[in-house]
Amino acid sequence: MSGNRPRRILIMPAHNEAGNIERVIQEIREVAPPLDIVVINDRSTDDTARRAAQLGATVINLPCNLGYGGAVQTGFRYAVEHGYGVGVLMDADGQHDPRGIADLLAVVESGQADVALGSRFLGRLEYRAGFVRRLGMAFFRTIVSLLIHQRITDPTSGFQALSYRVMRFFATDNYPSDFPDADTIIILAYVGFRIKEVPVTMRERMSGVSMHANLKPIYYVIKMLLSISIILLRQRTNAGAHYRPMTAPVNPPVGADKTARG
């Protein structure tokens, strides 16, 4: 830890990203503030793990394919167990421009919010998507904004910075295990975590197939609506205590493990 700055971790779930991960890690090292890169290798069948390790990233090899949600939660648990005070969640496919990492971290480390969401729709509108995808984004943008009484422009963004308390909260069963997305924002808002969006740039993936590629649009919509409905039901019953935030300091405990590297 440098001065009063908490230790930083970058959590990168990856599945068969051998064609991208070297360039992604190199770019992070070139343009982002110092932080430990931890790659969660979700049972890749290619050279993803070896290439990430060769560049000095810590690699966690999952024993079976857990999917995006399971890989991300593994990263949160690692961050909490090793005493990281702030985390960045970023994809391994090159779509998230790492020049946005500094702005995301600044929001959380300054105490402006518990979660900084990278939004491709704030600032310069360079992001382009197909009609169906734009329609889906607009639909969930409206739902999320109405439910949490806060304007959210990019509820499906996976480019985020999170405080220790949020990582600890999601290291438990509070995190959706299937495909966490807009529903996580609603959960965070309902338990009192502060959310702020930050303009970021998102690009086309460098190569290969996304971890989300097998998620069919109809299934995604049904899954999100069902998940949101369950959250609302819990909030309207005593089961709302299921999402009670854990009592924890903003920064990790003093003397936490310092063996992770990246």
Image: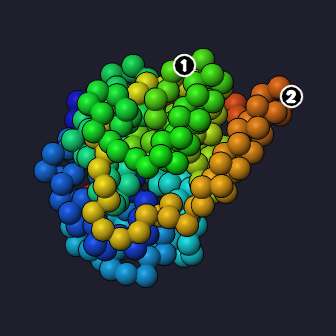
Q: Residues within 10 Å of mark 2 (few under 14, many from 20)?
A: few
The C terminus appears in which quarter of the rendering? bottom left
Q: Nearer the viewer, residue 165 or 226?
A: 226
Q: Distance between the residues labelled 1 and 2?
A: 23 Å
Q: Which disc number belongs to residue 21? A: none
Q: Which of 192 and 250 is in front in this view?
A: 192
Q: Which amino acid does label 1 sit on?
A: Gln
Q: Which disc number belongs to residue 237? A: 2
* Residue furthest right as drawn: 237
Looking at the picture, how far across and down is residue 139, in whole percent? 59, 35
Looking at the picture, how far across and down is residue 97, in whole percent? 26, 46
Asked whether the beta carbons under mark 1 and mark 2 sit within 8 Å of each other, the answer is no
SS at circle 1: loop
Q: Residue at x 86, y 29 (%)?
A: 238
Residue at label 1? 150
Q: How crowded is mark 1: few (under 14 residues within 10 Å), some or many (20 or more)?
A: few
SS at circle 2: loop
Horizontally, is 57 left or right of 39 in the view?
A: left
Horizontally, is 136 left or right of 202 in the view?
A: right
Q: Which residue is drawn at 65% across and 24% down?
A: 147
Identify the mark nearer the N-term, 1 or 2.
1
Q: Is residue 78 visible?
A: no
Q: What residue type is labelled 2?
A: Thr
